Image (cartoon, coloured by chain):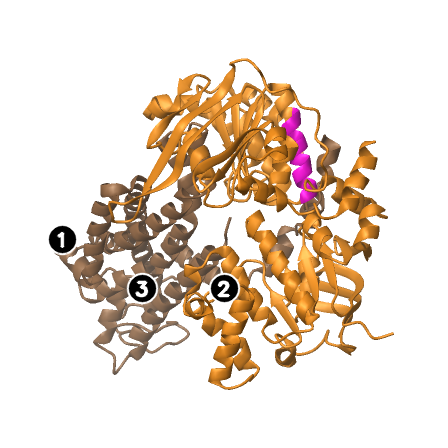
Chain colours: A orange, B brown
Amino acid sequence: MTAPLLEIDDLAISYKVGDHDQRVVHGVSFRVDRGEVVALVGESGSGKTTTAQAVLGLLAGNGRIEQGAIRLNGIDIAHWPQKRFDTIRGAVVALIPQDPGSSLNPVRTIGAQVAEVLQIHGRGDRRAIRTRTLDLLTRVGLLPAEMRADQYPHELSGGMKQRVLIAIAVALNPDLIVADEPTSALDVTVQRVILDLIDELRRENGTAVLLVTHDLGVAADRANRLVVLQGGRIQEQGAVKDVLAAPQSAYTRRLLSDAPSLTKVRPARRAPGSGEDFAIVVERLTHDFPVGGTAKRFRAVDDVSFKVCRGTTHAIVGESGSGKTTTIRGVVGFLKPTAGRIRIDGEDMTTLKGEALRRFRRNIQLVYQNPFGSLDPRQTISQIVEEPLLNFAPPPKAERAKKVADMLHRVGLPETFLGRHPRALSGGQRQRVAIARALVLDPRVLVLDEAVSALDVTVQAQILALLDELQKALGLTYLFVSHDLAVVQQISDTVSVMYKGRQVDGGPVDTVFARPNSDYTRELIDAIPGRKAPMLALSTASVRG
Amino acid sequence: MTSETHGESGAPDIAAIEAAQPGWLVRLRRVPLTLALAWLVVFIVLLWAVAPGLFTSYSGTVGVPGEQLRPPSLEHMLGTDGLGRDLYARIVYGAVHSLSGAFVAVTVGLLSGTLLGLIAGARGGWTDAAIMRLVDSMLAVPSLLLSLSIIVLLGFGTVEVAIAVGAVSVARFARLARSEVIRVRHSDYVEAAFGSGGTFWAVLWRHILPNSLTSVIALAALQFGSAILAISTLGFLGYGAPPPTPEWGLLIAEGRNYLSRAWWLTAASGFVVVLVVLAADRISKAIGKTTP
């Protein structure tokens, strides 16, 4: 039996916080064989990224390997000095970083950045390096390579930047590529293309991949083996098929049931109201933005119309730049559309301004994507939830306090949270506070802008369940913006699919998903991760049965 | 529902964190030594200003005949000046003039500068453009020249000097406050506050002001040091309080006449000024580091 390519043995890593060590990885052991894809799955804080960084010797300055070994080709590299890592980074182990937006040097051409790794390791003279660079760019699909090599990162899209980073990673044919959430910053269609590319290169060169991801769907599609991490400990590891078909640990089971792309079960839906009782009516909405300094205008939203019945959920789906955010900013009254009408409960939002608009705002509230930026860090939770009440003829203090406490209870937070500041809360808890703030005015419409995309799958599932419960109890109408079709399928009644500012598909979710009208929608549906693994359908079916 | 929330993974165990919050004694021990010394300097100088009589038995303005230009000794800790006045006593009695001057200067700069910056940043548009061009033109004039011109307009005296020094710092406060306000203004929570029906002034008061003040206050501490320096400069040049006021800048200026025979007169007063300015700088840095 040959030695594994990478063997991690009882690894423990701690970070120095203040003047004590906090251990974040506790005795993790797993291995990666040659040519194999191993997925390291877990939610944020599970230690998956720390483990991957240790393999590359890239732990943050306050991180320290306390015990255990990282054996690469049988050699323990756990306590190597940085200088020694230089010889193997790129050549033996390479990294595909998480955020393509900030991982490239903005002032150098991409050709120069690909060539850099070849130069560092002294692979040939200038001409040979140039030829190899162009080969690599061609290989990762950046065509024409001659032109791309002389472009700067800002001239490329996110997916193209990720291709550059992949080209850099595979430049020296390393034995192992560590891919740290390589696609989580990308749109779902781009995500699939990038993962396909990594797969293809891996097969060609026999490279092993350590795929770090929070998305069980991606892991299920791409990996041979799964390592499930929680709180720095391995919950379970084994072949993908075995883990998914018969998960051994309770945590894996929970992850499986929470992952929206893997559960096709949908709670029973109300039939979309057949009457004419529409809470939101958007008619021929068009929005132009001036293009800096010229008379030209950029049309971000082009002739979009949809209607949402009271008490139902309408989803707007599209990738970044599709105009979905512009649309909802028009709906909540932050932007005046160029043309078209938006009626909320029969009232035309587009004609309201000043004080009338302010008064109308209590009917429609927005929940933001990032719960870390949408709460004032200086306010306490009770101040945050109370604030909207102060804006409209505030009731007496005691009544306000009661209302705030009720609302907190409603979103499932204990009353002890009232005096705390947002920094003492996790992402999911903050998003609950944001929802409480939005609901405290008893609005009729709640607009959710990617409200669950920043959250881990289990927390995401809890927030979605909360939203569902609140909708039933309060008769709310949701306008739900998302790039994640799996989530949309799970919670919405009707859907609009947007592409480049136009609505390319629309109607009841079941109809759109079963018989998409446009190629784009079809592509989106095919790109949902987790569809390749047939055993998933089986396992969920058995749960349902 | 509630039990499920507690199980929400990734949530910091808040009870544990709060239990781990160290007591004030432990926290006090974690204060860096230099910061503690800086606070000590400021504390002593403040005491000088409040109760100078506790620190010296000599008068700050009346000299002892026959005791002129004595070098530092047990009797006169820092020696005496040309009129036989105890230098240490003069520095102690002078603290109130220098500190109150600096205080007035910083208050003038802080209040008017922050107000200008707040309005410019929050309103935007032509208001912003007009205010910031005004500020730019203030920054274009050398600060000493600007304070001198203001003193010429206002007349001589401690308060006048303080106002002149403060007026010069308005531009710096305004620029800093504006950039902070613009940063805070574009955050989601400010938009959320408008979205929940907040009026312009309510949002300004509840969110924008508290969140943009941290670095402005750090600048105020820094400016306190520079103001003492600027007031001393103007005092040295003879624009400040008239003699025999023991203002620190004036002490240095008077000591200059005896530099070859009694160097300690200039050195000791100068050293005190430097010490207070450094202390203010260190404290300002500590404030700047605290983030919400």
Secondary structure of the residue carrying tag 2 is: loop
Name the amino acid, label 2. Leu
Q: Is residue A358 above or below residue A114?
A: above
Could you tell me which chain the residue with mark 3 belongs to?
B
A60 and B30: which is toward the camera: A60
Q: Which mark is residue B90?
A: 3
Q: Is residue A464 magenta?
A: yes
Name the residue that disc number 2 marks: A142
A327 and B142: which is toward the camera: A327
> Which one is earlier in the sequence, the residue at label 3 or at label 1?
3
Q: Residue furthest left?
A: B153
Instruction: State whether the magenta stretch is mostly helix, strand or loop.
Output: helix
Residue at (51% x, 80% y) in the render: A129
Say if labels 2 and 1 share a chain.
Answer: no
Left or right of A528 on screen, residue B258: left
Say if labels 3 and 1 share a chain.
Answer: yes
Name the amino acid, label 1. Gly
**Range of residues picked out in magenta:** A457-469
> Which corner quadrant of the image does residue A150 belong to?
bottom left
Could you tell me which chain the residue with mark 1 belongs to?
B
> Which corner quadrant of the image does residue B235 belong to?
bottom left
Could you tell me which chain the residue with mark 2 belongs to?
A
| Other residues around mark 2 within 10 Å, as few (<14) / some (14–19) / many (≥20) | many
